[in-house]
Amino acid sequence: CWLFLLVAHLAEAVMRIALLPLAACADVCTLPDEARVDCQIGDQGGCEAAGCCWSPTNTDGLPWCFYSGQQCSLKYTSSGAPFRSSEMEKIRGYFRANIDINGTGAIIASPDASWNEGAYLFHWERDGSLTMQAMGRTDPDKAYVKTTFQNYVKWVTKVQNQKDPNGIDILAEPKYTIPSGVPYTGDWCRPQKDGPALRSLAVARYALGLFDENDLEGMDWVRSEVFGGPETLVQKDLAWLMQHWEDNTCDLWEDHEATDFFWGRFASRAALTVGATLAEKLGESALAAQYRETADQVTAKLWGHWTGQYVMETADRPLDSAVIDGFNVGYLEDGVFGPLTKEVLGTVKVLSAFFCGQYPINRADTAANIPGIMYGRYKGDVYVGGNPWILLTASLAQLVYRTAAEVAQQSSVDAEIYGLLVDAYQVDENLSTAKLAEQLMGTGDGILMRIRHHIEGVDFHMWEQLYKGNGTHASAGDLTWSYANVLSAMQFREKAQQAMTREVVV
């Protein structure tokens, strides 16, 4: 039995017909109430003919006809990398220009002085830490990476050894002025406890890499400046984290407060676990045990974020793409919220349905045969009107590439997980793992191709957002975090390609 789905052309003048199995429609229409976005069609026949889901409900204000996510096709047969090597070097150049400002170690969130009176001309602890993780992972120049990390650690050590002017612990300050390093004293959402987690995670991961490479000079630097006593960066941050990980905090979007954000918890778990590995390398077994004990406590709390259909960020803001970036930033290759889990795949299915319906540009791009989908922040977002974000869209692409890499190294995929892959990424059924990985690579490429479509005309400069109506650029320009996530996604694309060429161990 087949259901004929009509998909509108960009100008809504040309209608195309696509075939989708009825069973698949039933699965993609199984969405939580909060993910329903109204298709604005009042009868079942018209609703289903437009490719929307029809499900009557007695809940006031809840649409009966709603988007499923299938209106944003994720299928894409890739013909090569989404960005050429020369384009990647250009993007890397824009990225580097925002890092280690004048040798201070500071990282500017955006150099765009014209946006909102220069509101982004600061060093954010969150953005800076994520930038350093991306730079350390993706930049091929090891000498540059080493110098930049050393300057970054000097910067952090400097700015966090001063009296806090805002009446909070200096370690939980969100942002600092450049070049002075004085905390911003204007009205802002404070404290932000993901800063210590992300800082220590970035630096500890880099430090472990120095040990893996047997870099004697770098290892001495780690012992002296990174993990050489209670006042050095990683030890200081992790000591704070062990005491405060359950405290009230602002979220990564800096407009909401709670004690239980998934983003912060998953990052804290990663920081404590990676920190424990570094401590063990340095013979600090007692500290390592303390870190691991706290990490286990955090892990136990994480499972409360699973609703049975998706991973919520927090109870009173459940639909939030912060979890997508969190799945990437905090993953430890241990299967906990891994790319081939029901928790992660269910979350992608739900968020794709929501953002496909939420943003007209997503449906318009699909109708114009531009592959992929763009994600925004959360349901109810009103900042600059509430739009897709480049960094979150790139984060989704990175997650897809990681999924492809895991599939490529398996001889088979569990039937339930395969069904969730179909729902989340619209892959074909009954594929070999090699073909499935290939389709997922196409999905990731398609998502980055959609970003490319909207930035190619401005020489690959990246803003924070793209307007939901027409895809033009919005908010701050040359956003460092946008560059970081695109560079990271492309690096994980390379890893997925390598995994697809390795022999599968059965």
Image: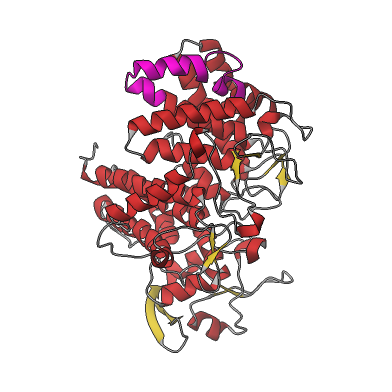
Q: Nearer the viewer, residue 238 or 221?
A: 221
Q: Is residue 200 left or right of residue 445?
A: right
> Whole-percent x and y of residue 24?
43, 67
Please identify the residue farthest to the front as the structure is shown: 102
Task: Give the vertical position of 387 relative to 124 (above or below).
Answer: below
Question: Would residue 335 be visible to someone looking at this image?
Answer: yes
Q: Residue at x 54, y 57 (%)?
A: 464
Q: Is residue 328 left or right of residue 264?
A: left
Q: Quadrant of residue 233?
A: top right
Asked if the stretch drawn in magenta spans residue 234, the answer is yes
Magenta segment range?
A: 208-237
Q: Main secondary structure of the magenta part?
A: helix
Give the image's coloring scheme.
Answer: secondary structure
> Whole-percent x and y of residue 273?
51, 26
Q: Is residue 435 left or right of residue 181?
A: left
Q: Residue at x 49, y 65 (%)?
A: 28
> Whole-percent x and y of residue 499?
27, 43
Asked if the stretch drawn in magenta spans residue 74, the answer is no
Q: Is residue 249 left or right of residue 279?
A: right
Q: Quadrant of residue 41?
A: bottom right
- For the N terminus, the quadrant is bottom left
> Whole-percent x and y of residue 95?
44, 47
Q: Residue at x 53, y 85 (%)?
A: 45
Please identify the residue farthest to the right as the structure is shown: 167
Q: Nearer the viewer, residue 297 or 141?
A: 141
Q: Nearer the viewer, residue 186 or 59?
A: 186
- For the C terminus, the quadrant is top left
